[in-house]
Image (cartoon, rainbow, N blue to C red):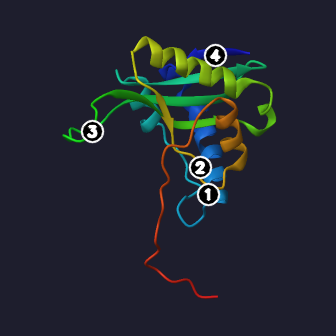
Amino acid sequence: MDIRLATLEDVEPICLLYNEFFAYNAELQPEYCYAANEGGEYPKSTITSDSSDIFLAIADGEIAGFIHVREGQTPPFDSVVSHKYAEIIDFIVTGTHRRKGLGAKLLDAVKQWSSARNLAYIEILALSNAEDAIKFYRREDFATVSHTMRFSLTKTED
């Protein structure tokens, strides 16, 4: 298992993983997520950005997962302590490669990336019903610091 930064040559297999990621999210929260197809512009813009990167997990000669991280900055409000932090935007390990340590290795790469940039912490938004992912983040010492709550303005018919 190797972890490395993505290059523009990796865009096509990254798109296939994004399609799997989108389908997974659509299954978990169909009212908010679609099983879309990634065309490549998004990973290209991430790979060429100075403030974000995609790390790839390579297993058995293929890309088995990735993690997309970018630098975030607190808003310029008088009441907020100004700082930069890392945001994990997207994170997937293919189903056949889960529970083999790839996710932890990808997260370690993000921890090193974040430390090298002197960022205050790493943040991730997890879907509330992604129970396996939440358990993984807790094992990796992530703590819940806020909750996003929604009040639906549309009624569903039974």
Circle 2 SS class: helix
Query: Nearer the N terminus, badge 1 or badge 4?
Result: 4
Residue at 51 percent across and 31 percent down: it is 68
Q: Position of residue 101 (x, y in %)?
A: 76, 24
- Among all residues in the image, which is located at the extreme top? 116
**Circle 4: element type:** strand
Residue 80's disc number? 3
| Residue 48 position within the rendered picture, expressed as x and y whole percent measured from the top left | 38, 23
Label 4 environment density (alpha carbons within 10 Å; few <14, some 14–19, many ≥20): some
**Amino acid beneath label 1:** Ala
Q: Relative to 150, is 60 above or below? A: above
Is the residue under label 2 in contact with that under label 3 (CB below 8 Å)?
no
Q: Position of residue 46 (x, y in %)?
A: 42, 29
Q: Measure the C-alpha gap from mark 3 to mark 2.
A: 33 Å
Q: Which label is found at residue 26?
A: 1
All told, the count of numbered labels is 4
Q: Identity of the amino acid at label 3?
A: Val
Please say if the residues under marks 2 and 4 sit with CB atoms less than 8 Å apart: no
Tell me if I can see residue 155 in this picture.
yes
Residue in the picture at 48% in, 16% down: 113
Determine the residue positioned at 48% across, 22% down: 8
Residue 76, by quadrant, is top left
Q: Amino acid at mark 4?
A: Ile
The answer to whether 17 appears left or right of 118 in the picture is: right
Which of discs 3 and 2 lies nearer the camera? The answer is 3
Q: Which residue is mark 4?
A: 3
Tell me whether circle 1 and circle 2 mark residues in contact (CB < 8 Å). Answer: yes
